[in-house]
Image (spheres, grey):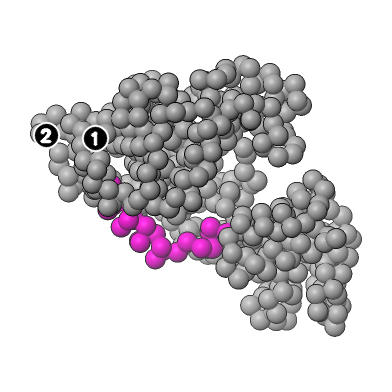
């Protein structure tokens, strides 16, 4: 049977060859017969090593004669695993971290380099024994934050320009935390009080979240999510609290026609159906039918019947011209607001991919604005923290569509904490303790036809 560290190495090998970290991890765990604690250890080692990659490489650069990029790929990954345990895993004794890493090197073709691995890790332990951090950092604030918190320079520069040094550091620290799990209660089948009671009776601690009437955050839980009370009964679904704000901003009403153009995997679609009392029609589409299967599964589990599925690129769909009372564009984006959930996203996105995404977002918004009827509204939302995908897209749209405007928010509403003078909403993770999001509600101007 595979031990957890060997499995972590196999999974990381796939990630470094281009596999998505979450996909590679799921695939690896499915093949292995591991206990729950061992599965957690594999998950922590894989996500942690990917997330902290730049910091771990910097340590290798400082402790070894050969730089990290000069090491054999598997050996570099093995050293990453050892250093990650020593630096970030307080519950693992240093001796266990060293011994298991040396054994990993021995059993994966590096028997002649076990002395090097042992020496490097023990050198790290000696240098940190005084209580000082042995990681040498440059004075340049971009590089310092990038190496210390393991982000590419361009992301650090982006946040520094908007937030300044202190808040950027807070955001970097927040993004390296393990993500929380939030539930959204289905009010058509239960109450938040009933779900609280059921979960607490099963030994699962939860707490409510301000401004969100359907949200519960798991404080402690064990085992798989589908095994929690109420899952099979459709009492709740998993959805981050900031994503729940989007459907509230859309504010769908019973009997309306709503178009959710980039709907998969369907968290917001099912929320819209709940807010409408499952009365009306929701057209939920996506480019690939496979991505819509999860939406259909959740709709069935939550016992929702108002959702109609269609497959297709929203830019090519003409059947919805002026058909929607409300339209949601949950736009494809870089996901810079959810980097804590997607360990490898910080290394996959580049300034070039941001440019491509912002063009796609602009094209989608321009086309979807034709789906809205005379008195309707459209909500544009992303889970990113890049102005090129958010503020710039909206500003350019309004400049080229003078018959549109930002719809004002209700005063003293659930959105007050996130509202901006410009009229859009921005959720900063380090300030609001939830995923980073941008959202805005648009409507036709009074003098438009």
**Residue to which mark 2 is pinned:** 448
Q: Residue at x 35, y 37 (%)?
A: 283
Q: Residue at x 82, y 61 (%)?
A: 2
User: Position of 21 compared to 389: left or right?
Assistant: right
Q: Quadrant of the C terminus?
A: top left
329 vs 201: above or below: below
The span picked out in magenta is 344-365
Residue 148 placement (x, y as % from top left): 62, 59
Q: Residue at x 63, y 17 (%)?
A: 194
User: Position of 194 compared to 249: left or right?
Assistant: right
**Residue to which mark 1 is pinned:** 323
Q: Nearer the viewer, residue 15 or 286?
A: 286
Residue 236 placement (x, y as % from top left): 58, 28
User: Position of 351 compared to 182: left or right?
Assistant: left
**Element type at marker 1?**
loop
358 vs 426: above or below: below
């Amino acid at each position: 049977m595979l031990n957890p560290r060997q499995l972590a190495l196999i999974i990381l090998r796939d990630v470094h060859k281009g596999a998505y970290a979450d996909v590679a991890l799921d695939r690896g765990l499915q093949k292995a017969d591991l206990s729950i604690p061992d599965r957690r250890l594999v998950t922590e080692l894989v996500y942690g090593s990917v997330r902290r990659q730049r910091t771990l490489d910097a340590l290798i650069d400082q402790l070894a004669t050969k730089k990290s990029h000069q090491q054999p790929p598997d050996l570099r990954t093995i050293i990453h695993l050892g250093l990650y345990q020593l630096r970030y895993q307080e519950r693992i004794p240093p001796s266990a971290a060293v011994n298991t890493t040396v054994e990993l090197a021995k059993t994966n073709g590096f028997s002649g380099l076990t002395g090097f691995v042992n020496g490097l890790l023990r050198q790290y332990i000696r240098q940190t024994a005084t209580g000082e951090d042995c990681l040498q950092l440059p004075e340049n604030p971009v590089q310092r934050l990038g190496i210390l918190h393991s982000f590419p320079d361009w992301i650090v520069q982006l946040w520094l320009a908007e937030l300044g040094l202190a808040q950027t550091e807070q955001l970097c620290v927040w993004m390296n935390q393990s993500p929380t799990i939030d539930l959204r209660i289905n009010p058509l089948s239960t109450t938040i009080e009933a779900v609280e009671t059921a979960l607490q009776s099963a030994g699962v601690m939860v707490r409510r979240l301000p401004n969100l009437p359907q949200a519960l955050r798991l404080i402690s839980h064990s085992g798989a999510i589908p095994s929690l009370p109420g899952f099979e009964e459709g009492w709740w679904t998993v959805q981050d609290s900031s994503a729940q704000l989007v459907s509230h901003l859309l504010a769908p009403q019973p009997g309306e026609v709503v178009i959710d153009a980039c709907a998969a995997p369907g968290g917001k679609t099912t929320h819209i159906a709940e807010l409408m009392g499952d009365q009306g029609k929701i057209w939920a589409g996506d480019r690939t039918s496979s991505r819509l299967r999860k939406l259909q599964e959740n709709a069935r589990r939550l016992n929702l019947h108002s959702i109609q599925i269609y497959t297709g690129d929203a830019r090519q769909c003409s059947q919805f011209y002026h058909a929607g009372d409300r339209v949601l564009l949950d736009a494809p984006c870089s996901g810079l607001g959810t980097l804590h959930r997607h360990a490898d996203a910080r290394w996959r996105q580049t300034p070039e991919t941001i440019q491509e995404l912002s063009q796609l977002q602009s094209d989608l918004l321009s086309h979807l604005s034709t789906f809205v009827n005379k008195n309707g509204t459209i909500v544009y939302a992303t889970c990113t923290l890049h102005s090129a995908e958010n503020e710039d897209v909206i500003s350019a749209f309004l400049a080229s569509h003078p018959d549109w405007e930002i719809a004002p928010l209700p005063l003293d509403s659930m959105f007050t904490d996130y509202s901006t003078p410009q009229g859009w909403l921005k959720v900063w993770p380090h300030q609001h303790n939830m995923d980073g999001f941008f959202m805005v509600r648009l409507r036709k101007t009074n003098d438009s036809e």
